[in-house]
Image: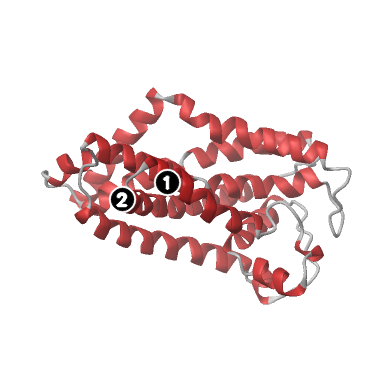
Amino acid sequence: MTVFLSDLYAIAGRHVHHLVRLPEKLIGFTVMPVAMVLGLGILFGGSMRISGGGEYGAYVAAGVITVMAVSTVAVSALGVVDDLQDGMFDRLRSLPVDRTAVLLGRALVDSLPVAMSILGVLPAAWIAGWPLGLGIPEVLAAMGLELLLGVGCSSLGVFIGLTIRNAEAVTSVVPVCLLPLTFLSDAFVPLDGLPGWLRTLASWNPVTAVTRTVRDLLGAPSAVTEMSFPVRHAPLIAVGFCLVLTVVAILAATRAYDRAGTVR
């Protein structure tokens, strides 16, 4: 365990150093979510009605944060492709470095910008009409859940990068997979206007569970009209999904790591 933690610290430190040297990589996690909350909340706030009352800007803020966490799939996948092209994984395989530490270290660091998204979205949501009255424990719990989702999605991105091993293919495949997952949820619109079968499908979407839990923690309007099983147990579904996704993705990525070679 000591060796694993030492390797994890070294790998994560490398990626943090790389992130600090290229701060422009954080623009997508700082400027984009703020612009989305302000744009959606102000432009569409007057036409969107939330069941139970509340401003649309407050409603959509949690959805934007969750979408930022899900988007770490592409960040990690492209980062892994770069490492493959540079021959980094070949060098690491020649050293006594724990394989899981190599992969988990990237996933952990790639999920850190999600915390910056939360810190940027909260004041933007207040401008869009969210009367913030948040406690520190609730904010930390919401941030922890989104970071956990970010780690799971980053782990999935590591596996995709090791499997596809081509930047152009990653940029084509990942959005096609993520768009249905994010838009077939209550991240941007309430589910009460959807047809019955589609509402049921969206209610069981893990993105809906995470977003709904974050809304409850931060006191945002949730537009819940029926207390179905996924509504009552949204926190359990959200945490369980994030943990299972992380474990399965890291295990799959470890197997792909053994087979991956330098991309030329």
Specify which label sits upstream in the sequence, 2 or 1.
2
Residue tagged by mark 2?
A: 162
Please state which of the two labelled residues, at mark 2 or mark 1, is closer to the viewer. Answer: 1
From the viewer's perspective, tell me whether residue 72 is left or right of residue 37: left
Which amino acid type is marked by label 2? Leu
Residue 187's spot in the image, x, y percent? 68, 53
The structure's colour scheme is: secondary structure
For the question of whether residue 194 can be seen, the reply is yes
> Which secondary structure lies at badge 1?
helix
Q: Residues within 10 Å of mark 2 (few under 14, many from 20)?
A: many
> Which secondary structure lies at badge 2?
helix
Which amino acid type is marked by label 1? Val
Q: Nearer the viewer, residue 32 or 104?
A: 32
Q: Nearer the viewer, residue 32 or 241?
A: 32
Residue 147's spot in the image, x, y percent? 50, 49
Residue at figure coordinates x 61%, y 34% from the top left: 32
Residue at figure coordinates x 46%, y 43% from the top left: 171
From the viewer's perspective, tell me whether residue 79 is left or right of residue 179: left
Q: Are marks 2 and 1 in contact (CB under 8 Å)?
A: no
Q: Nearer the viewer, residue 49 or 86?
A: 86
Residue tagged by mark 1?
A: 170
